[in-house]
Amino acid sequence: MPLWKQALLTGAVVAAAFVAWALYLPAARPLLTGLGVLEPMQRIGLIAAPAPAPGADAPRPAPAAVTVVAVAPELREIEDVVTAIGTARSVRSAVLAAEVPGRLVSLAVASGDFVKAGAVLAELDSEAARIALARAELLLRDAQSDFARLSRLRQSGSGTELQLQEAELALRGAELELRQARFDLQRHTLTAPIAGWVGLLDVEPGDLIAAGSAIATIEDRTSLLVEFRVPERVASRLAPGDALLAAPLADPAARLEGRITALDNRVDQTSRSLRVQAAIGNSGDRLRAGMAIGIEMSFTGAPHPAVDPLAIQWGAEGAYIWAVRGGKALPLAIRILQRSAEAVLIEAALEPGDLVVTEGVQMLRPGAAVTLAPGSAT
């Protein structure tokens, strides 16, 4: 075979092998692209151009709007609640004590009795005082007789002025002795200084009582006084007559109304607190002096947006909410001011007309279109 025919046949075989390599080996296409021969081979039809991906040239459909429940935030005043614990004492209390020594001869009251002011509660043996009173009355009558006799003599010119003055002085002394005797006798009778309930009695008739010994304690607990302390931050917001709620720690369900009666005149420098006194009604007579009383006072502040607790979300940068503004979803960072079971007071860059998403937050993205579901309130 002539040489030129052999060269032509060899070139045809190499060309066929090259085309087959390009057609059936996908790894060849990057190399052909680098040599710059892939595109010419595709134009002359040796290699088919890749089919376009389905929908590659078609415009992407707009994402569907997210359906959410959103409501307008409600403005509520922030509530500052101050609690304290104080000790109750009776509005009035008195200790009935013996002023003079003596033997207790009668006791007209029992433990727990209610007594009226001025009621006789006990009597001490007063025989010596009665004898002293009788002697003082006798001396007074004698002094009155002497003074009358000397007055008549002085008028007739028989008596002297000095004798009359001495008789008058004796008369005045006898009168004072009688007053003292009556006073001493009165101190043997013990009367209630105030109305109230008598505490437990530790004495019995026949006991020898020393001067100053306590016979009974009387407590007027128709209302109670409670002293407690509040932080200095609320000192300027308190005034006598302000209302408060009180409850004994032993029975927190017994909510009682009270009023502030007095404020201390200075803040304690150590505790930075102010001492406050309040009066609490005790119409049911359920409270006793000495009980621990819980105090609660509420103060209102500036209004802030209140949102449903379900609207609060948490991210890497803290708490936030989803707001609906212009039909689009917008995340807003918030600061929680106060939380309760039904609402959370927040501080956020809300604008008039914004809605806060409470349901459907899982599907939201910044700028996503939003459709309001039934139940949304604007």
Image (cartoon, rainbow, N blue to C red):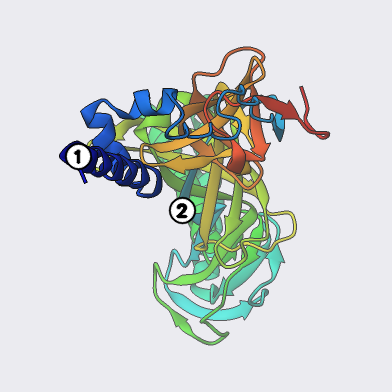
In the drawing, what numbered circle is on residue 295? Answer: none
Name the secondary structure under disc 2. strand
Q: Residues within 10 Å of mark 2 (few under 14, many from 20)?
A: some
For residue 199, side relative to residue 334 (left or right): right
Q: Position of residue 175 (x, y in %)?
A: 50, 46
Query: Can you name the residue that lies furthest to the top here?
Result: 352
Name the foreground residue: 314 vs 136: 314
Choose top left, top right, bottom left or bottom right for residue 363: top right
Query: Can you name the residue that lies furthest to the left here?
Result: 3
Residue at point 52% right, 27% down? 366
Q: Position of residue 255 (x, y in %)?
A: 67, 53
Residue at point 43% right, 30% down? 234
In the drawing, what numbered circle is on residue 7? Answer: 1
For residue 308, side relative to residue 155 (left or right): right
Query: Can you name the residue that lies furthest to the right here?
Result: 374
Q: Tell me: residue 224, above or below residue 360.
A: below
In the drawing, what numbered circle is on residue 85? Answer: 2
